[in-house]
C-alpha cells in the first residue's frame, strides 16, 4: 500500500527553520546561565554536555530567545528532546516563590509519561521543584493525594469539604500527564487548576493531535486562555462538566508578557516526525512559532543506524526470524509486528521453539497495563532479551542497550519505520534495524527508505543451513500454536458470552481495539 501523499502548503514560518544540525554538543560548563545546581544534577545523571537540540532549545528559552516564541521541534529519535524541554522549564521555574502547577507535559501513553517524569525528577528537586504524574490505570485517589495539598484542619472544627476548594493547593510545580487522566482531574479533582500554567509541552505531537480524547487540547487551551474584556465568554464555551471550574488563566495575549500582569502560556511541541499540516498545527494555537529542525530532510534517521533487509517467503518468516535472533546471540532486541494479534501469535510461536538461549516476551495493548509494566521492567533490567511488540512500543520509549530492531512486518509508512528503528541507535550510539520482506515488497520498501534519505539497505544473509535445520521443530511449534489459538478463542467466547449476559464488555475485548 503506498503512503498517501497529501500536498499541503508548508506554513511560512516553517520555511525558515533553525537548523539544529549546525549546532555542536556543548560541555555543561560552557552552557550559558545554567544553574550550578542543575549542572550537578545533570552530572549525576552521567551527562557531561548538552546535545545540539538541547542547546538549540536552550538558546530560544533561557538564552537570548527568552521564551518569546512557541517552539516546534522536529529532531530525530534518541536526539534528547526530553531534556531539551525539561531543562529550560526547570531552570525557569527555579526562581518561583509560591508552589502551584506551572508546567504541564502531555504524552500519549502511560509508559512514556513515566519515562518523562523520571527525567524531570532527576533534575527538578535540585532547585526545590516537585513533579507529579497523572496517568490512566492507576488509582485516581492516590494521584489526587499526590497532586493536591489539603489545608490543615483546626482541632475540633469540622469543615465541609465542599467549602474548602479555595484552600486546596497544588503539591506539584510540574505535571506529566496522559490526556485521559488529565481530563479526569480537570473535570473532577477539587483544587486542580491550570490557572497558573506557564508552560505546555505536547510531546509526540503528531500522535497526540490524533488523540481527540474528550477534546483534551481545546479544553486545556481554553482553560489557559484569557481574552481581556471577554472573560465570561470562555466560561460559556466550556462543556457543562467544567462549569464549576474557575480555572481561567489571566494571561497576556501579546508577544512575551511585556506590560502584562501575567505571562502568556508558552508552548513547546516536539516529535521526530512533526506534522507540517497547517490544519493540524492550527489546533495548537501557536504564538509566533519558531521551527527547529535537523538538516534539510523532513525525515531523519539516527546517524549511527544501519538498516538491513532479509528477503524470504511469508511462510518461512518465523524461521528467518529465529535464525536472525540466534545470530544476534541474545543482544537486546525489539521485534515489531503489524498488530496486537500478530504480536501475540508470534510471541507464542517463538516460545514453542524449545531451547532458544534468550527470554522472549510480548508487549502490546492486548495486555493489561500491569503485565506490560512488568515486561518493560524485565526488558530494561536485561532479564528479557527479546521483546515482541506492537506499535504501542514504537514511540518515544527509551530502553538502554537495545542493539537491534527487527521489523517482522514491513512498516507501511516511513513515520512508522522511523519510530520503530529509533528504539535503537539512541544518544549517538550505534544500532541496527532489520526488515523481513517478501520479494514483492522490496520495491515499496526502497521507496519508503528514500523518504528518509536512506539509499543503503543491504541484504543481511542468514545461512540457509540454519533455517533448514529448524524445519521439524517449526512444524511442531505451529501445531502447538494452532491448539493454543483455538483454546484462547474458546475462552474468549466464554468471557464474551458471560460479559454480554452481564451487560458489559470484557476488558479483554476492549483492549483488542487499541494498539
Ligand atoms: N545531554 C545528554 N548527554 C547524554 N545522554 C543524553 C543527553 N540527553 C539525553 N540523553 C540520553 O539520550 C537518550 C534519548 O533521549 P530522549 O529519550 O530524550 O530522546 P528523544 O529525542 O525524545 O527520542 P524519541 O524521539 O524516540 O522520543 C536517553 O537515554 C537520554 O538519557
Image (tube, helix red, strand yellow):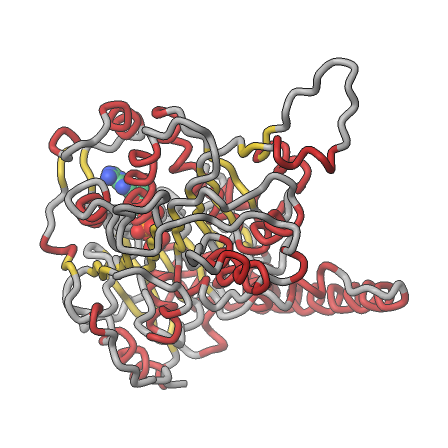
- The part of the image, by quadrant, that contains residue 406 is bottom left
Q: Quadrant of ligand 1?
A: top left
Counting from the top left corner in percent of width and height, residue 514 is at 59, 65
Q: Is residue 484 above or below residue 126?
A: below
Instruction: Kindly tell me whether residue 384 is visible in this rendering.
Output: yes
In the image, 225: left or right of 60? right
In-image side of 85 versus 232 (left or right): left
Q: Answer whether residue 473 is visible to the viewer in this image.
A: no
Residue drawn 42% across and 50% down?
A: 397
Question: Looking at the image, is 228 positioned above or below residue 296?
Answer: above
Q: Position of residue 340 (x, y in %)?
A: 57, 65
Identify which residue is drawn at 36% across, 69% down. 281
User: What is the x, y in percent for residue 291?
Assistant: 23, 61
Q: Is residue 245 left or right of residue 53?
A: right
Q: Nearer the viewer, residue 39 or 507?
A: 39
Residue beneath the point at 21% across and 61% down: 293
Q: Residue at x 39, y 54 (%)?
A: 203
Q: How many marks?
A: 0
Q: Residue furthest right?
A: 501
Query: Which image quadrant: the N terminus?
Result: bottom left
Furthest residue toward front: 229
| Residue 253 picture quarter | bottom left
- Image quadrant holding the C terminus, namely bottom right
Q: Estimate the x, y position of residue 506 in percent, counting from the top left.
A: 77, 61
Amino acid at each position: 500500500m503506498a503512503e498517501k501523499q497529501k500536498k499541503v502548503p508548508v506554513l511560512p514560518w516553517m520555511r525558515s527553520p533553525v537548523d539544529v544540525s549546525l549546532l555542536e554538543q556543548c560541555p555543561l560548563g560552557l552552557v550559558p546561565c545554567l544553574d550550578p545546581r542543575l549542572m550537578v544534577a545533570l552530572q549525576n545523571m552521567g551527562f557531561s554536555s548538552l546535545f545540539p537540540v538541547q542547546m538549540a532549545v536552550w538558546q530560544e528559552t533561557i538564552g537570548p530567545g527568552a521564551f518569546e516564541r512557541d517552539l516546534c521541534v522536529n529532531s530525530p529519535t534518541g536526539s534528547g528532546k526530553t531534556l531539551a524541554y525539561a531543562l529550560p522549564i526547570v531552570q525557569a521555574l527555579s526562581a518561583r516563590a509560591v508552589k502551584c502547577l506551572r508546567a504541564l507535559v502531555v504524552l500519549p501513553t502511560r509508559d512514556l509519561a513515566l519515562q518523562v517524569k523520571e527525567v524531570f525528577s532527576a533534575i527538578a528537586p535540585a532547585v526545590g521543584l516537585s513533579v507529579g504524574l497523572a496517568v490512566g490505570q492507576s488509582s485516581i485517589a492516590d494521584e489526587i493525594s499526590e497532586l493536591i495539598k489539603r489545608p490543615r484542619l483546626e482541632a475540633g472544627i469540622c469543615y465541609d469539604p465542599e467549602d474548602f476548594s479555595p484552600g486546596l493547593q497544588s503539591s506539584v510545580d510540574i505535571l506529566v500527564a496522559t490526556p485521559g487522566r488529565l481530563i479526569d482531574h480537570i473535570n473532577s479533582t477539587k483544587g486542580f487548576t491550570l490557572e497558573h500554567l506557564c508552560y505546555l509541552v505536547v510531546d509526540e505531537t503528531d500522535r497526540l493531535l490524533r488523540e481527540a480524547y474528550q477534546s483534551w487540547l481545546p479544553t486545556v487551551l481554553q482553560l489557559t486562555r484569557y481574552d481581556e474584556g471577554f472573560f465570561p465568554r470562555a466560561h460559556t464555551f466550556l462543556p457543562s462538566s467544567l462549569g464549576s471550574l474557575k480555572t481561567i488563566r489571566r494571561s497576556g495575549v501579546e508577544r512575551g508578557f511585556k506590560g502584562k500582569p501575567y505571562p502568556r502560556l508558552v508552548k513547546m511541541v516536539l516529535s521526530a516526525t512533526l506534522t507540517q499540516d497547517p490544519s493540524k498545527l492550527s489546533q495548537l494555537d501557536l504564538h509566533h512559532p519558531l521551527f527547529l529542525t535537523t538538516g534539510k530532510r523532513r525525515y531523519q534517521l539516527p546517524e549511527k543506524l544501519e538498516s538491513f533487509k532479509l528477503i524470504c517467503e511469508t511462510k518461512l518468516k518465523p524461521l528467518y526470524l529465529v535464525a536472525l535472533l540466534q545470530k544476534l546471540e541474545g543482544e537486546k532486541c525489539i521485534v515489531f509486528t503489524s498488530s496486537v494479534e500478530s504480536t501475540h501469535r508470534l510471541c507464542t510461536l517463538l516460545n514453542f521453539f524449545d531451547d532458544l538461549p534468550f527470554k522472549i516476551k510480548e508487549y502490546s495493548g492486548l495486555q493489561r497495563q500491569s503485565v506490560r509494566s512488568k515486561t518493560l521492567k524485565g526488558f530494561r533490567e536485561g532479564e528479557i532479551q527479546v521483546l515482541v511488540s506492537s506499535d504501542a512500543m514504537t514511540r518515544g520509549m527509551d530502553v538502554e542497550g537495545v542493539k537491534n530492531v527487527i521489523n517482522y512486518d514491513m512498516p507501511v509508512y516511513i513515520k512508522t519505520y522511523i519510530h520503530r528503528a529509533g528504539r535503537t541507535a539512541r544518544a549517538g550510539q550505534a544500532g541496527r534495524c532489520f526488515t523481513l520482506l517478501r520479494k514483492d515488497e522490496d520495491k515499496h520498501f526502497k521507496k519508503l527508505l528514500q523518504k528518509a534519505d536512506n539509499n543503503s539497505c543491504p541484504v543481511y544473509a542468514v545461512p540457509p543451513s540454519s533455517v533448514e535445520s529448524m524445519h521439524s521443530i517449526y512444524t511442531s511449534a505451529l501445531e502447538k500454536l494452532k491448539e493454543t489459538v483455538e483454546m484462547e478463542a474458546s475462552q474468549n467466547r466464554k468471557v464474551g458470552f458471560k460479559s454480554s449476559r452481564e451487560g458489559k464488555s470484557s476488558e479483554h475485548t476492549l483492549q483488542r481495539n487499541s494498539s
